[in-house]
Amino acid sequence: MKRGVPASLEVDKETFEKVQTTSIQKAINQHEVPAKEKHVRNAILGTYQEKGAYTFWHVVRRLQLSTHVITCWKFCHVLHRMLRDGHESTLSCSVKYKQQVKDLGKIWSHAGQAYGTIISKYSKCLVQRMEFQVKYSEFPGNFSISDDTLEKIGNNDMNTSLELCVDILDCLDSQMDLQEAIFRTLDFSKAISMTAAGQCRLAACIPIILDSSQMYDYSVKLLLKLHACLPPDTLIGHRDRFTYLYEKLKKFYYQCSNMLYFKKLIQIPIIPESPPNF
């Protein structure tokens, strides 16, 4: 027992760390099955109890992330969930390990296997997500902000709004890149979404769906605002890029809506049949 610290607090801290370690290790392991929701949820709740992700990173840094491909893939998925749903300090805790996340992407990009490719894409997506939130601290982990807050970030400055729009499209681009890579690894001649191996990969699409639907909404609002203030020719590059991503997003949501796996887990967003006419 530490000097001056009540024994009950020491025991509580020890119990907390044991429970968290067990949950994180059960969520992130070598088995090609999706992480169980109860273990991920326990890890997320732990960030609220300790107001940060200290225990999470203490545990995952000791896992075989650079030597076992499934463990690393599940780490990426759980980290995404932690960043979305964990305590607000999860971001500041995780940014410290941004380089390690980048390095994992590089390590597995040279592995020459399906999981290696999607880990590389996921690593990029997670790093970009963290950098976006650091740059725009008004966005919480779940990316949910009001129209007033979106307006406030733009600060009635067209250059700031243009930059925010580009950064949002960059995030959307990396999300679409990741989901396309995931789908390329699946064998659609089989009922892949009902197999444990298929679900291990598809589980990552759930936070991608949640992130991308919000990024899509914000990009539409920003482009409408920009078109109201700037000549259309100035924004042709933005429009072309948006349309390109819109088509990818539409296809992604269509694919997910036709898979049994997603039907019980998430409501797939519906976007217009045609892109907005800015």
Image (cartoon, rainbow, N blue to C red):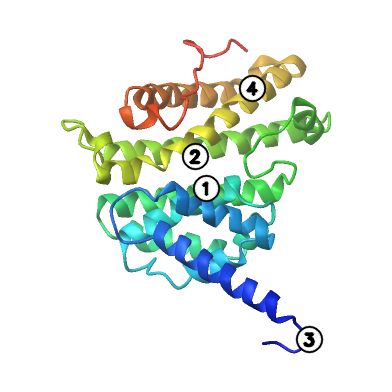
Mark seen at residue 4: 3
For badge 2, the amino acid type reads Pro
Q: Give yes or no for contact between labels 1 and 3 (Cβ–Cβ under 8 Å).
A: no
User: Can you say whether 264 is above or below 72 in the image?
Assistant: above
Task: Answer whether labels 1 and 2 touch (C-beta < 8 Å).
Answer: yes
**Disc 1 residue crowd, few under 14, some 14–19, many 20+, Cα 10 Å:** many
- Mark number for residue 157? none
Task: Give the residue drawn at x 39%, y 42%.
Answer: 203
Image point 42% across, 38% down: which residue?
Answer: 205
The one nearer the camera, 233 or 238, is: 238
**Which circle marks residue 235 in the picture?**
4
| Quarter holding residue 152 | top right
> Which residue is identified by label 2?
207
Q: Which residue is mark 1?
A: 81
Quick check: can you spot residue 123? no
Q: Earlier in the sequence, mark 1 or mark 3?
A: 3
Mark 3: which amino acid? Gly
